[in-house]
Amino acid sequence: MGYLTARTTQELQAKIIEKADEETLILTPGRRLARRLRHAFRIAQIERGRRAWLPPKIVTLNSWLNETWLESWPEECIVSDIACLCLWKEAVEETALPEGLESDIGLYRLLDETYSAIIRHKIPPLPRDYLSPLIGWRQKAFEIFEGRLRAKGYVHPAFLPALIKDKLRDGSCVLPKQILCVGFESPAPVENDLLTGLAKDHGAVICSTESNEPPYIKAVGLPDVEQEVMWLAQDVLEKAQDTPLHRIGVVVPNMSAYAPLLSRVFQELIGSPTVEEGGNYNISLGESLFSQPLTQAALLPLRLMLEGEGRGLFLALLLSPYYGLWGRHRNILAQADRVWREYSIDQGLSDLLYILQKKKPEILSFIHPPGHDLAGLLRDLPGKRTGAGWIEALYRLWDIMQFPAINNEDEERVFRHLQEKLAALACDLGEEKIDAYTFYAWLKYALEETKVNVPGYEEAGIQVIGLIESRGLSFDHLYVVGLSAGSLPQPVRHFPLLTREEKSLVQGATIESQYLFAEQAFAHLMTVAPAVTLTRPLEEKSDPLPASPFWPEGEENTAVNYWLEPGQASLRAGWLRQAHEGWRDHPIPYPTEDTPLVPAPLPDELSVTAIEKAISCPFKFFADTVLRLSELPEPTIGISSQEKGNRLHRLFALFTSQMRKQGVFLTDAGQSESILKECIAEVLADVTDNPYWQIERERWSGLLATWLCLERKRKEEGWRWLLEEANFSSLQNASWPFTVHGRIDRIDINDGERKICCWDYKTGSTPPPVDIHTHFLAPQLPLYLLALRGGKTSLPVPFQSLTAGYISLKSEGEVQFGEPVKDEAGWETCLSAWEKEITSLGQRLSAGNFPADPKPIPKGNRNGACQYCPYLTLCTYWKKEEENDHV
């Protein structure tokens, strides 16, 4: 049994290359080390002046096992991943599931991981009298699975090391003259048996590093993960000034958590990642085929059907650049979303298409494929099909929708991968008919398990790799990132279907084994480079984050502030560089006052609502009325408050007019209630099947009963309905720079007192009286009275006095008639004051002053006039408040 050792991985690689020739087999745990050794061998031959040579065979252990098995002409085939899970599905369906478990892909994967762990770690069978109900069920599932595996002529991949060892023993496999095993610090027992057998019986050499000379170590603590990664990128850039990029390694024990942030920051500061054999860096955590934009687009028709025919998915399908059918009309189709938002249609293909047909038929004409009905095509999908049948249906939809519209080689590569996986899936799923949900679950799993961003080449920039991938590699400088508790050692692996005794035999299934693995891995990292920098975040979400037990003493704590001290490396980020250059070259002091617009872009006539907005905040008025900016409406689940209010207003106007036309009095309860029901039916005619409106209609019954009761009392006091939805326009005052128009919800008259009362229905909150006669924030009622007094609304009868009020309709218990000003003298004073207020407002607006001046002013948790403002991102008010807070 031979060993080859060295103090560092670089020295070990040199010895391996020196020893290797064309009759050598070199086994590695991962592809990256295999590629690195191939590259090193090629460079060594060139340096020796050779023009041609035969390389050694350098492959991963798994690749060699599969290849050797196939070359032995076995009777059994290695079961594929999907086919294996399908067999687990059959096994589960033949057993009585324990309570709490569900038959899904997650359970099949758990069973397979448990089965593999038992085989790879040589865990002996449990005695039957020891089995708990859960473990007993597991064993039953194992027995059925193994029977199905044999019946299909399959062999599980976990058995390959033992099977190959047997074939080597009986001479079925031919081995090369020399075998070198590199990077196997902690193999599973079954792999260890194979490697030991190769060494003892076939002269294989086990290659490893052993050193008592630690490298130069620098430990740096950063406030949080983002600053840690930013500091890392800056330091790597500085190191790259005198170190070749491919000789800089970054090991990330918790790669899945760090990869997205690393990718973003490296993209900003370092540039594009690896492309072929060029580039600046490559991050080894490949992206799944499922996450690719083209794949996501490919699955849109299926997801649209499975996920409730949502507005977002339908819009994504129409606007996707991968569907050529709608390519020339996307600017028109995008307008459909505004229609859907305005009418709160958030799902249901029929409803989405119906509202377009009703409101924007010109858009609908671009949606349906020629000769096809889109809704019909998608409705043909439900049902049960074989895997091949589902894939055929997908291809048919893609063909009709002209998918994929490919723009570059990367997208072609992704689509080829997708086609290959679909073909394999069709074969693995067999002839069983499954529904769309099951098919999508299998498809999603297969695509998620397929990586398309293969790790790059050894000369392709900075190597960002995981802990296991670092085995056997060498660098001039190594960074180990995120060395906090929970990263190294990592949390215990979850094996809920193993007993406590079984877990003690599985690597990583106990705290002790995880620590031992981490200790071995960290010791190996100390041989990878002569200089090692360790980094860790000090906090996570403002909570202190303990360091890894391997963290050395004497750390250096620092921070990164790319706003105040960006540093040379940080300024490589385009957005940050442009921001700093802009501040430096074109300083723009924040204005102490908003600059007036001259001449003022003020309309000649304003609505009552516009006047109210101008009083509430001149800037909101400017954005809404002058610039005509409109907020993109968000779909409402159920019924929007605006729609409820609009329909209730229509109902009251229709009811009061019908009662007058038919000469029915409120005292005739039966007849008036009959007319009310007819009016309700007319107002809700287009939403009778809507369950939300069915509930709202029930709520109306109590509210309207209370309202009718109060109306009868007013009838007894001498009041009757005179007009509803009375429009007025050209309301003016000599000192106003504009005229005003509006609509009064209802006008009543008391014939005995010859008194007019105008009402405004309120389905939401009612303004307090002080907002009318003291704070001057609610101009509706005063402007209505000014319009009546000025004769801007034609009344069929003469009157002597005026009043106004609100009819609150917020809920059944809050129905009330309220007059904020109790007598005619009070109204005269109030109206006179309002004329002056509007004059002052007009002077400010006509001078071009539209400051962000909200009333009521936000205080504490109350946002005042800013509560529902859609223009906060354009507003200067909060910026000024922040400056005042710092004064």
Image (cartoon, helix red, strand yellow):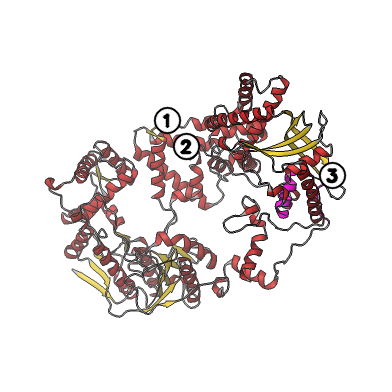
Mark 3 element type:
loop
Mark 1 or mark 2: name the one nearer the start of the chain.
1
Farthest-out residue, right: 734
Magenta stretch, residue numbers = 599-621
Residue corresponding to mark 3: 732
Q: Quadrant of the N terminus?
A: bottom left
| Label 2 SS | helix
> Viewed as shown, does residue 448 lie left or right of 264?
left
Quadrant where the C terminus is found in the figure:
bottom right
The residue sitting at 38% across, 38% down in the picture is 438
Residue position for label 1:
383
Task: Answer whether residue 32 is visible to the viewer in this image.
Answer: yes
Give how far across and how far down residue 354 sits, in percent: 60, 31
Q: Amino acid at mark 1?
A: Gly
The residue tagged 2 is 394
- Residue 337 vs 840, above or below: the answer is above
- Tag 1 near tag 2, CB within 8 Å: no
In space, the residues marked 2 and 3 are separated at their CA atoms by 65 Å
Disc on the earlier residue, 2 or 3: 2
Query: Would residue 273 be counted in the magenta stretch?
Result: no
Proximity of marks 2 and 3: CB atoms separated by less than 8 Å: no
